[in-house]
């Protein structure tokens, strides 16, 4: 008996056709998303996006037909950014762990290698200093980011902070626009 | 603050930003672009150019694979004569010349009428194989 594929994926040609038919707003979304993940890993946004498209057209990544090409490419770029970060062999700046612990930081899981753990702590400390400076005038934004980093879902964050959907959406937009300006100023998170 | 064990803090912040971009309406995205003095035509052209470049790169890679594959096929086919002993080669050669008199005679003429050695026959059969003749059928004793 014929069993339809429960998770059909787009062929390379179908994916390409959808890409070339994107709206102006979707092109802008792609640009913004590539800027976010590029800022995260240090690649150029254009290079990151082109590599993501290449992977899909080569068939190394398959886009489910029920998923939009923009969110799918966002996920591919996220993955590429993560791979790029893992591949980097950055020499960490030395900073005592005790200082991080005093700041209330919970060390990552023991499953991480000591080097990864150390790098994660460094990145987190640097990031958090930047975030606090960026949102020094907005405590709610800092709380949203704290919950977000801790792994909470949007619904939970709204509930804990007593925000309705509109207020949360508005605050999330506010956060992004501030980060937009930071990216434009510094080019990297 | 609890720290997620499997997700980096920076990634979590980027996820929030990307989520916001994906959830924004078209009008909101276009309004932002206007606020940022973004040239819409340039962005769209740039994105579509990158898509075109990616497609071109993939096409080049595919073509390279095809060429490489064809090269392997040809090199494998060149080894055709190596699979048979001299007696078998002569048998295949005789069968082939019988069925392809014109082409075979031309090649034999190119040897200036010299007696053909087993090595000559091997060399000629390999040449015919490369030219696209199906010699397997002669080897199997079943020429069309």
Image (cartoon, rainbow, N blue to C red):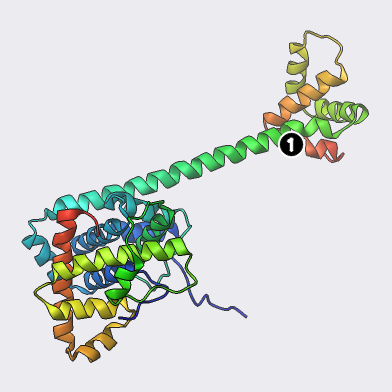
Q: Chain of mark 1?
A: B
Q: Residue at x 35, y 67 (%)?
A: A97
Whether residue B95 is visible here, answered yes or no, is yes
| Image position, residue A74 (x, y; %) | 33, 64
Which corner quadrant holds the C terminus of chain B? top right
Q: Quadrant of the N terminus of chain B?
A: bottom left
- Crowding at dot 1, Cα within 10 Å, few <14 / some 14-19 / many 20+, comes out as some
User: Could you tell me residue B125's position as x and y percent?
Assistant: 77, 26
User: Which residue occupies the foreground of this view, A27 or A187?
Assistant: A187
Q: At x 89% / y 26%, what residue is drawn?
A: B90
* In-front residue for pair A14/A59: A59
What residue appears at the point 61 percent right and 41 percent down from the top-left corner? B69
Relative placement, left or right, of A87 versus B94 is left
- Quick one: A105 or A65, which is closer to the camera? A105
User: Vertically, is B61 above or below A5?
Assistant: above
Residue under label 1 = B134
Q: Position of residue A83 (x, y in %)?
A: 42, 58
Q: Is residue A163 above or below residue A69?
A: below
**Which quadrant of the figure has residue A143?**
bottom left
In the rendered image, is residue A177 in sight?
no
Given residues A24 and B132, the one toward you in this image is: A24
Q: Is residue A174 left or right of residue A158?
A: left
Q: Secondary structure at mark 1?
A: loop
Q: Is residue B36 left or right of residue B75?
A: left
Q: Is residue B86 left or right of residue A187?
A: right
């Amino acid at each position: 008996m014929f069993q339809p594929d429960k998770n059909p994926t787009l062929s390379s040609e179908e994916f390409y056709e959808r890409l070339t038919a994107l709206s102006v707003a979707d092109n802008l979304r792609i640009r913004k998303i590539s800027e976010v993940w590029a800022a995260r890993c240090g690649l150029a946004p254009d290079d990151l996006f082109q590599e993501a498209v290449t992977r899909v057209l080569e068939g190394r990544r398959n886009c489910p037909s029920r998923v939009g090409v923009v969110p799918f490419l966002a996920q591919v770029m996220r993955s590429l950014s993560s791979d790029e970060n893992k591949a980097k062999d950055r020499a960490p700046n030395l900073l005592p762990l005790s200082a991080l612990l005093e700041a209330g930081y919970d060390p990552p899981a023991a499953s991480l290698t000591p080097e990864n753990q150390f790098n994660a702590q460094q990145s987190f400390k640097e990031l958090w200093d930047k975030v606090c400076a960026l949102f020094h005038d907005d405590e709610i934004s800092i709380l949203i980011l704290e919950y977000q980093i801790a792994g909470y879902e949007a619904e939970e964050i709204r509930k804990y902070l007593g925000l309705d959907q509109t207020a949360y959406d508005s605050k999330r937009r506010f956060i992004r626009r501030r980060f937009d300006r930071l990216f434009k100023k510094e080019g990297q998170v | 603050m609890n720290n997620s064990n499997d997700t980096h803090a920076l990634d979590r912040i980027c996820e929030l930003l990307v989520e916001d971009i994906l959830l924004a309406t078209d009008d909101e995205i276009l309004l932002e672009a206007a606020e940022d003095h973004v040239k819409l035509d340039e962005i769209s052209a740039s994105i579509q150019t990158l898509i075109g470049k990616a497609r071109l790169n993939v096409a080049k890679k595919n073509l390279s694979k095809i060429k490489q594959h064809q090269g392997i096929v040809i090199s494998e086919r060149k080894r055709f004569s190596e699979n048979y002993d001299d007696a078998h080669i002569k048998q295949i050669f005789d069968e082939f010349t019988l069925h392809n008199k014109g082409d075979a005679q031309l090649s034999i003429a190119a040897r200036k009428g010299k007696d053909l050695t087993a090595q000559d026959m091997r060399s000629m059969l390999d040449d015919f194989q490369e030219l696209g003749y199906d010699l397997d059928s002669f080897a199997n004793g079943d020429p069309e």
